[in-house]
Image (cartoon, grey):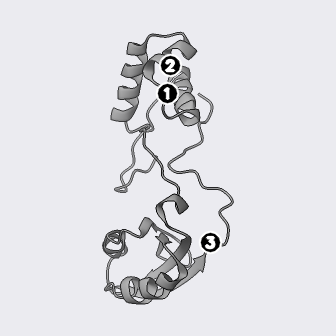
Amino acid sequence: MQIRNGRMAAPPALDALDNSIIDILRTNGRATNQDIAQQLSVTAATVSARLQKMEDARAMRVVAVTDFAARGYNVIIAVGVRVQGRGIQEVGRDLAKFPEVLSVNAMNGGYDLELMVALHDFSEVQEFLYDHISGIDGVAQIDSGVAVDIVKYEFNVVPLGPT
């Protein structure tokens, strides 16, 4: 398993109980330890200990996810970036500083970096691309596409495989 800083790490071992806890929280992120314990016929202390173990191992985390439109972001764009004259990671870190940038991914293929960007409306697109993104040292070329419909978006969700 590759982690964010590029080092390899063994995936944490999750058993059936861990996976069941995660499944319940995926369905109802507000479920209490007591609610989960009742559904799984274990104690709340067991659920608490398992959650702590999974969070410490970075196997999962409980987060609140907001809807783009509910926060006033009505334009989602994907931006491919070719980098020249600077390191890809260095340019990526600079691009990640913009609050509008939701993700920065180092890529292989046609672009060195791929960004997901959220903007309030179309009037912001040109300025953001040409004044902000293109203004970063090392950005040699950008290519953007506007999301016309979001068919699937699951934040921070990894499919659970067989245990």
Q: Are marks 2 and 1 in contact (CB under 8 Å)?
A: yes
Q: Residues within 10 Å of mark 2 (few under 14, many from 20)?
A: some
Inspect the image, locate mark 2, and give the three-letter code of the amino acid beneath it: Asp
Pointer 2 residue: 35
Residue depth check, mark 2 versus mark 3: number of the one nearer the observer = 2
Tag 1: residue type?
Ala
Residue name at image x 60 percent, y 42 percent: 159
The amino acid type found where label 3 is placed reads: Ala
Which residue is identified by label 3?
A: 147
Q: Residues within 10 Å of mark 1 (few under 14, many from 20)?
A: some
Compare residues 126 and 154 and report the one nearer the observer: 126
Disc nearest the viewer among 1 and 3: 1
Residue 44, placed above or below residue 81: above
Q: Position of residue 122 (x, y in %)?
A: 54, 81
Residue at image mark 1? 31
CA separation, marks 1 and 3?
33 Å
Q: Secondary structure at mark 2?
A: helix
Q: Secondary structure at mark 3?
A: loop
Q: Nearer the viewer, residue 137 or 5?
A: 137
Residue 92, image x, y percentages:
36, 72
- When the figure is inspected, residue 138 is found, relative to residue 99, above or below; the finding is below
Q: Is residue 85 left or right of residue 143?
A: left
